Image (cartoon, rainbow, N blue to C red):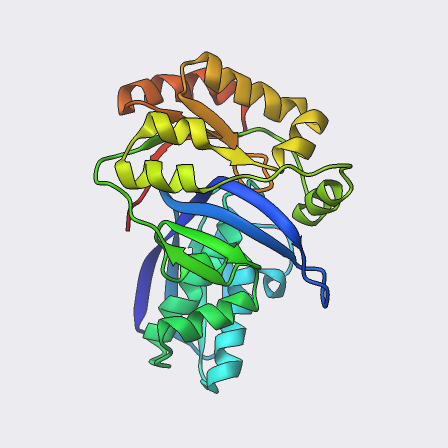
Amino acid sequence: MPELILPSYAKVNLTLDVLGQRPEDGYHYIRTVMVPISLADRVTLRTAGAISVSCSPAIDGPPESNLAFRAARLLQDVTGYKGGAEIHIDKVIPVAGGLAGGSTNAAAVLTGLNRLWGTGLDQQALIALAMRLGSDVPFFIPGRPARVEGVGEVITPLPVAPGPIWLVLATPDVAKSTGNVYRLYDALPAHRHLDARAVEQALADGDPVALARALGNVFEDVMLPRHPEIAAVRAALLEGGALGALMSGAGPTVFGLVADEAHGRALVEKVRPMARSAFLVKILDA
């Protein structure tokens, strides 16, 4: 039975801005700098007669609600492929953490089954399919640092200087709905906007100090006041010597940018008691 095993990397948003809504469907226009990080699930794909999905540890809900299942079914429907696949996901990325664990799994299934099934779609065709699954999924098809705009479909690769940039991730035990975070943001009386150019330049220069100064996420404006656990983790990262700290995506995961690996390991232990998970990771440049 043919088999393919793929890493499925998480992401963080170094800057995230909301620019308005698309009139016809209410989807939000965004501008964000996203980078893949070394934290990863493992996706195992095997050819089979039908599509099935399992996760370890198990995730609540029917398999058909899993984004990985929906990705396989979409590829099957679009290409007319007659077989199926057994999909198994070894989960490491915190679920509903603002790190796009479901989206990266879906992208891994699209790219992996395209190879395993021999369906022959090019990258642009896979990105178009990914857009039908969710706004974060297209980023993971090329899977490299990028400015992402529109409703997630405009992906501009960004240069990253060689050399590791280390991040401490901490995910406090806060439940959230991304859709509700958007609704709360829309209801704010005023909206600030961010300039992503300083983040892009700092990545190109490999300058973690400049990168730390340039971090920004407009969703902090609604999440930090409502969830003191997130604000406390963010404060602890900064008090522990992080160069900068930011909530990723719609949260609740917060990352702290650190100067080196040794400092990062010490800081992980400091914030671990405040979080349901904590990791030391690095930004992947390709």
x 31%, y 22%: residue = 259
For residue 281, above or below residue 31: above
Residue 93 picture location, percent across and down: 46, 43
Question: Total of numbered circles in the picture?
Answer: 0
Residue 236 picture location, percent across and down: 51, 16
Q: Give the side of residue 164 with respect to residue 171, left or right.
A: left
Quarter containing the N terminus: bottom left
Extreme-left residue of the structure: 162
Q: Give the side of residue 229 with respect to residue 194, left or right.
A: right
Residue 247 picture location, percent across and down: 54, 33
Q: Can residue 94 be seen in this view?
A: no
Q: Give the side of residue 255 with respect to residue 191, left or right.
A: left
Viewer-side residue, 53 vs 284: 284
For residue 187, above or below residue 210: below
x 37%, y 81%: residue = 119
Give the quadrant of residue 127: bottom left
Q: Can residue 75 be seen in this view?
A: yes
x 68%, y 62%: residue = 22
Viewer-side residue, 11 vs 266: 11
Viewer-side residue, 86 vs 77: 77
Viewer-side residue, 244 vs 119: 244
For residue 209, above or below residue 51: above
x 57%, y 44%: residue = 17
For residue 201, above or below residue 75: above
Extreme-top residue of the structure: 239
Residue 116 picture location, percent across and down: 33, 74
Give the quadrant of residue 282: top left
